[in-house]
Every structure is written in structure tokens, then in C-alpha cells.
Image (cartoon, rainbow, N blue to C red):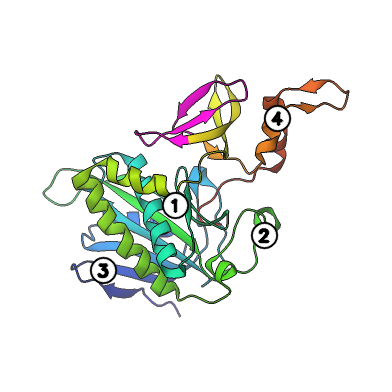
Amino acid sequence: MTHGPRVRELEDGRYLLEFEILDSTQSEARRRRQAGEERLAGVIAAYQRHGRGRRGSVWYAPPKQALLVSYLVPDDDMVNGAAFLSLTAGVAVARALERLTRLPTKVRWPNDVLMNGRKVCGILVERFLVRDWGSLPRSFAAVGIGVNVNIVQFPERLTDQATSMKLVTSRDWSIEHVELAVRTALFPLLTHLRKAGRDYILRLWRTMDATPNTLYQTPLDREVVTGRGLAVTDKGALLIRLPDGRELEVTNARHCPVSPKVLQQGTKATGEPTTGSETVAREASERMPKPGRGG
């Protein structure tokens, strides 16, 4: 027997829909908002059949062990662009988890949240248009957030990259309480972004930024290059340094889980020296899984 979603009314007059199973919280939130559910604040699922991360990658989350939520954000919260919406969501989740666990929490461009150096949460922002009756089209975003709450075992490809709140703290957590903490942190920060602009969000980000020295891959001149992260710019972009010393400001890059030592000069099997970029490209292609939201 199929049951409908649980409706959770919020103090501001909007509501959340909670499902046992969905294909994707992102898709469901978008579909319902475009169908005219103006008071819908977000969609939560205990399990996703086809959860996705950035670049269409598959996201891992066993049933009832992770927070899987997509919040709907109207266009007036996006005056600073989707990049800053993504950064804001990352900061909000990091602050929420730090307040709950009382443990240091970091962020990594573009919006990964880390505990003990491993990914505990990932975020996916997708924009779409809504045409409400009698009004002009408006831009919305579905902000998908996946927090690894009580997961204790990950697939082999993720074991050295992902963690969960339970693994870090050695205790179980209420997913409902985690959602409340995330939502309570997120929406006030969106108000700050809209009213005060980027500077406030950037200041918060930089107090918990783990981007420096992280390796990233980005397309350049019809090939993929790997560089070391330096900082997040005032525009919300990523500044990286390539092995040849060049610095690039990029908006299209993904984290590469390879030790920074591969940027140093290595040795080919023939005994000939290799460049840092050759070593990075080889190890990255061998070891880098597709990035995903959350784990």
C-alpha cells in the first residue's frame, strides 16, 4: 500500500513534505513547485532511488541513515548568483553540524562540508523557472542537501573520503533534529545574502575554508588539468595554481582525491623524470571517483 507524504507545517506558513521513498528530492521539489505549490518549502526523503550529485553522479545513502532534503529558494535570494547560493548552503550546513556536534567542521569549494578531513555532506543547486498563474516567470533553485548522519559503512571507493556524524561522534543522531538545525541555519543566511551581499558570506566561509592545498581538476585548452587550490575569490570562484606556476580563476572544477605530493616531480618507469602535471593526471584518472552529493 502506498502512503502519501507527511506534511510538516512551518512557522512561516510554508510546509515540508516528507516521503519514505522518492526517485529524487530535487526532481520532486521542482515538479511540485512548477505545478503550483507556492507554499512548499522543501521535500525530504528517507531514501532516494536515483539520488544525484554534481555533474549527474550517483549519490550513496542507505535508507533512513542520511538527511536527504531539497529546499526551494526563490529568485530574490539569488541576486548574488548561484555560486554564492551554493557557498551559503555550505556555510549553513557546516555551522549547523558544528553546533550539534561541538566539533570543528570545514567547507571545501564549491560546497562540500568536512569533518575530520572527510566529506560528511554535499550540496547540489539546480535552477529552474516557475510560471505561477497571472505572474511573470520567476527563477527558483532547488538546494539539495545530503548529510551522512548515521551511516557506518561506505562503499570501498568512498571509505577514505567520506564520513558521517555517527562515525565522528560515536553516537546516533535524529535525522529530524539535523534537518531542523540545517534549516534554522540556512534561511537566515539566505536573508543575509540577499540584504547584506556577498561579503558576510565570504567572511564566514573563510573562517572554515579547507580549499587551500586541495587538488582540483578543471578543463583548459581541450584537456583536463590538475592544480592546487589557493582560495575562493570575491566572486565565489576557485583560484588554483597549476604545476607550472600559473594561477587560474575557475568556476568549473571538481575535487580530486589525490595527495598533494603528486604535484611534485616523479619518475617514469624508464627512469626519465615526469612533470608534476603528468603524475597528477595519471593518479587522478586512476583514483578519482565521480563526485556526489553527501558521501
Q: CA distance from mark 2 to mark 4?
A: 30 Å
Res. 42 visible in picture: no
Residue 52 picture location, percent across and down: 50, 52
Classify mark 1: residues with Cα within 10 Å, few (<14), some (14-19) or many (20+): many
Tag 1's secondary structure? strand
Residue beneath disc 1: 123
Q: Name the disc covering residue 15, or none.
A: 3
| Residue 42 appears left or right of 94 | left
Residue at 28% over, 54% down = 189
| Residue 208 appears left or right of 187 | right
Q: Which residue range is magenta in the image?
A: 231-252
The residue type indicated by label 1 comes to: Ile
Res. 189 visible in picture: yes
Residue 117 picture location, percent across and down: 58, 53
Quarter of the image containing the N terminus? bottom left
Q: CA distance from mark 3 to mark 1?
A: 21 Å
Tag 3's secondary structure? strand
Q: CA distance from mark 1 to mark 2?
A: 20 Å
Residue beneath disc 2: 155
Tag 4's secondary structure? loop
